[in-house]
Image (cartoon, helix red, strand yellow):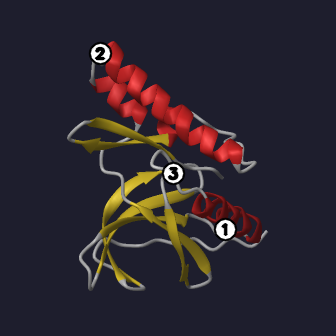
Amino acid sequence: MEEVPLQIDVGHQVDRYRVVRVLGQGGMATVYLVEHLQLGSHHALKVLDAASSALKERLLREGQVQAKLHHPNVVQVTDVLDLGGVPGLLMEHVDGGDLGQWLASNSPRTQEVMEIFLGVLAGVEAAHQQGIVHRDLKPANVLLQRMESGWIPKVTDFG
């Protein structure tokens, strides 16, 4: 199995984006906060840590699945970047951390828990309506966006 390690440094330019910082790291990929050089907008960029052919295909499938889901409770994938033969998924940036982190540092009221739970269900239902099953739904795969009205949960990582 061919593996190509990929490391992206903070400040590095990737396509039309500048890498601002690492947002998180999972089992097979690292997610970076990137800034569009011309627009100044922030996005998340998910890049494989090792790029075997099978992992590249899996990441592209994840991107294709998530790009089809247009729902306020699903993280939107907007583009795929070619990083020297390694795909990178460009996604909306959700800046509130994940549900697991939030639960560990907060004592939520029942109403907050219900609103987040119903939002997660709405995102998963939108996926199910398109024949997509999330096979790894857990607090780390639910990101939270802070809004004036409260927290908006956004399901991610449909890989």
- For the residues labelled 2 and 1, the Cα–Cα distance comes to 38 Å
Q: Is residue 133 left or right of residue 8?
A: right
Pick whichever, 38 or 85, lies toward us: 38
Q: Is residue 7 left or right of residue 124?
A: left
Q: Are marks 2 and 3 in contact (CB under 8 Å)?
A: no
- Residue at 62% over, 61% down: 68
Q: Secondary structure at mark 1?
A: helix
Q: Is residue 49 left or right of residue 108?
A: right
- Residue at 29% over, 15% down: 109
Mark 2 burial class by Cα count in 10 Å: few <14, some 14-19, many 20+: few
Indicate the amino acid at tag 3. His
Q: Which mark is residue 109?
A: 2
- In the rendered image, the residue lying farthest to the top is 110
Can you identify the residue that label 3 sits on? Answer: 71
Q: How many marks?
A: 3
Q: What percent of the width, then of the height, locates residue 130?
A: 71, 51
Q: Is 51 drawn above or below residue 16 in the view shown? A: above
Q: Secondary structure at mark 3?
A: loop
- Residue at 54% over, 58% down: 29
Mark 1 burial class by Cα count in 10 Å: few <14, some 14-19, many 20+: some
Pick whichever, 148 or 29, lies toward us: 148
Q: What percent of the width, then of the height, locates residue 43?
A: 36, 66
Which label sits in the foreground, 2 or 3? 3
Q: Secondary structure at mark 2?
A: loop
Indicate the amino acid at tag 2. Arg
Q: Is 37 drawn above or below residue 28 in the view shown? A: below
Pick whichever, 87 or 152, lies toward us: 152
Q: Which mark is residue 72?
A: none
Can you identify the residue that label 1 sits on? Answer: 60
Pick whichever, 114 or 47, lies toward us: 114
**Where on the picture, by quarter, is residue 92?**
bottom left
